[in-house]
Amino acid sequence: MAENNHSDVTSMPFERAIDELESIIKRLEEGKVPLAESVEIYERGEALKRRCEELLKAAEARVDKITTGADGKAKGTTPLDVK
């Protein structure tokens, strides 16, 4: 289960990843999940957390590349090279 779930996380959009991560956190906090399943969903949560961090870092880099004019307003963007 973990291998397949981690691979589909790599292409997941931020909103879907964060929603699923919040759901996992809620389930774990309730404490009603059997131990084996807790470990599995915790691993999935870690993969989702990494995905969200990756997407946030890319978005932050894009925002940092916005250039401003003398009036303080955005006048354009510069090319971004994020891998």
Image (cartoon, rainbow, N blue to C red):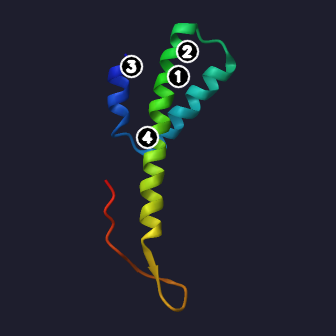
Kind of residue at disc 2: Ser
Name the residue carrying label 4.
51
- Observer-nearest of 17 and 83: 83
CA gap, disc 2 and disc 3: 12 Å
Residue at mark 1 to residue at mark 3: CA–CA distance: 10 Å
81 relative to 18 in the view: left or right: left
| Discs 2, 1 touching: Cβ within 8 Å | yes
Point out residue 48 in the picture as x, y percentages from the top left corner: 46, 34
Read off the residue under disc 2: 38
Amino acid type at circle 1 is Tyr
Q: Contact (CB < 8 A) between labels 3 and 4?
A: no
Q: Residues within 10 Å of mark 2 (few under 14, many from 20)?
A: some
Alpha carbons under labels 3 and 4: distance apart = 15 Å
Question: Disc 3 on helix, strand or loop?
Answer: helix
Q: Residues within 10 Å of mark 1 (few under 14, many from 20)?
A: some
**Residue beneath label 1, please?**
42
What whole-number distance in Å separates the C-alpha atoms at marks 4 and 1? 14 Å
Please tell me in which quadrant of the rendered image residue 32 appears.
top right
